[in-house]
Amino acid sequence: MADYSGLLPLKLIRALNAANPMKTMPLDILPEDFADRTLIDIYQQDPALGTSLFDRQPMQGRNDVYIYCYDVHSNFGQHRHDFFEILYVCKGRVINQVDGENLYMGQGDLCLHNTNAQHKLECIDKNAVLINIDLLPSVFEGMLRGFCMEDNQIANFLKNGTDIVRNYMFFAARADALIQNRIREIVHEYTREDLCSDIALEAYLVLLFITLERLGEFSFYGVDESTQQILDYIRENCTYATLNEMAEHFHYTPNYLTRLIKMRTGRNCKDIMKEAKLQKAIELLSNSKMPVGEIAERVGYHSISHFFKIFKDEYGITPRQYRLLLES
């Protein structure tokens, strides 16, 4: 799982947003008043009380949508909802067990559950913070109804199509802030109380699903324990080890390793390796005075021009511009 816990200075965030708002580094997505107004830990109650936790403890939501944030301090038992649920990991790590399958989720990972999903959470990191976005059936009578009429995997999942493989869809973390920005937009709109906020909230939800569909990076399997070990190893060693060497470490062929990663995360192994290299470059640019050419070598790019191109394609600015923004 990705760990993008180091938040960037506000000045740099604003500059990057202005340059390219959908390809920035991770942001703090919670507005200041979010916890005060919507922090409701409904899992303090016994999950055996009923199918719908809302039946026992109504929340002050926004008609068809309920959003809350909570810390995962302990395990809680298996339960099922009579609504769709988006589970997004803001911070830390957690095991989300769905229908008996252990999904290892870290910062930036997202899981979409349908109404048939039986799930429970296992605490493996007391610093873990989750956001739940719960969509009651009535929300699909509005703007989301139009999206669900489309013929794509997420739309079919939301209307419980007969070709659904699992009762969940797993979306692995991305190093850019694309999905995080979408979640942030939804959360910020949820805390507003103006005349059109309900309409805007539905529109942002539609935009989230469209973004996820266009990325096409999802899995009906999710990251299990062995895949998590592989991902951790890749992110730790990708700056100097080749794909062949990493595959050999786990006694796999390179083709099998890439197929396994694709099946479990929905993402290409090469993209995960590239992101890990760029994240290490970000750390060195931010926390050292090492020359950019040396940083390129350190993270596995022997051509500085190629490093500049990859970095700019990902973040919209060059490594030197990034460092100048940090210093300004």
Image (tube, rainbow, N blue to C red):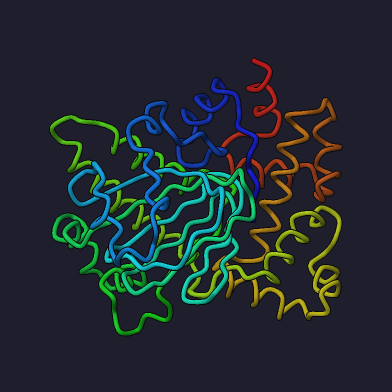
117 or 30, nearer to the observer = 117
How many marks are shown on the rendered structure? 0
Q: Residue at x 31, y 70 (%)?
A: 115
Residue 55 vs residue 323: left or right?
left
Q: Position of residue 21 (x, y in %)?
A: 45, 36
Q: Residue at x 36, y 72 (%)?
A: 153
Q: Position of residue 181 (x, y in %)?
A: 44, 41
**Residue at the far bottom in the pictured view:** 162
Q: Position of residue 201 (x, y in %)?
A: 25, 43
248 or 318, nearer to the observer = 248
132 or 233, nearer to the observer = 132
Where 276 falls versus 26 (above or below)?
below
Q: Quadrant of residue 50?
A: bottom left
Q: Residue at x 78, y 61 (%)?
A: 233
Q: Residue at x 38, y 33 (%)?
A: 34
Q: Quadrant of residue 273?
A: bottom right
Q: Position of residue 23 (x, y in %)?
A: 51, 41
**Which corner quadrant holds the C terminus?**
top right
**Which corner quadrant holds the N terminus?**
bottom right
Residue 109 vs residue 56: left or right?
right
Residue 115 vs residue 35: left or right?
left
